[in-house]
Amino acid sequence: MTPARRDAIALACIAGFIAALLLYRHIYVEPREWGAICAPGAPDIPLACLPRAALLWLQYQYFWGLGALALGLWAFLGGPFWIRIASVVLGIAAVINYNATWGMVGAALGVWAWLCRPRPGVNVRPG
């Protein structure tokens, strides 16, 4: 697979994940009705409240941003291609979920590692 094709597939995956996350937040997280339905002690809590609760717990504990930062550091220090993409995805997800402080750093490190990766057949050592 050529690097350009791999990059195009990675960008499509990033866009798809971010679109799905934004759609989920729009439907299940932001409406006040879901907040009332999923409130602790509410009768007959639907199954849809479990992923909502997990998403919000990860948000409140800053795990979106810390995960993005960890993946971004791994990518920057020479992680494989899929780690670079995962750090970008998780970094953008962290920003969407209000963990922008660490999420932006993780996404930036992932993008930097993605764009500055060694090209095949190019000598990266001086001399």
Image: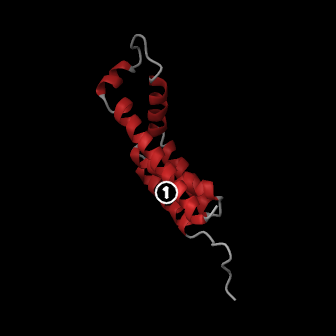
Q: Residue at image x 45%, y 23%? A: 48
Residue 86 percent across, percent down from the top left: 56, 51
Residue 73 vs residue 123: left or right? left
Residue 34 vertical placement versus 89 (above, below) = above
Residue 83 percent across, percent down from the top left: 61, 54
Q: Quadrant of residue 84?
A: bottom right
Q: Residue at image x 41%, y 18%? A: 40
Residue 8 vertical placement versus 61 (above, below) = below
Q: Amino acid at mark 1?
A: Ala
Q: Which residue is mark 1?
A: 107
Residue 9 vs residue 100: left or right? right
Helix, strand or loop under label 1: helix
**Picture quarter with the C terminus:** bottom right
Residue 78 vertical placement versus 24 (above, below) = below
Numbered circles on residues, count: 1
- Furthest residue to the top? 43
Q: Residue at image x 63%, y 72%? A: 118
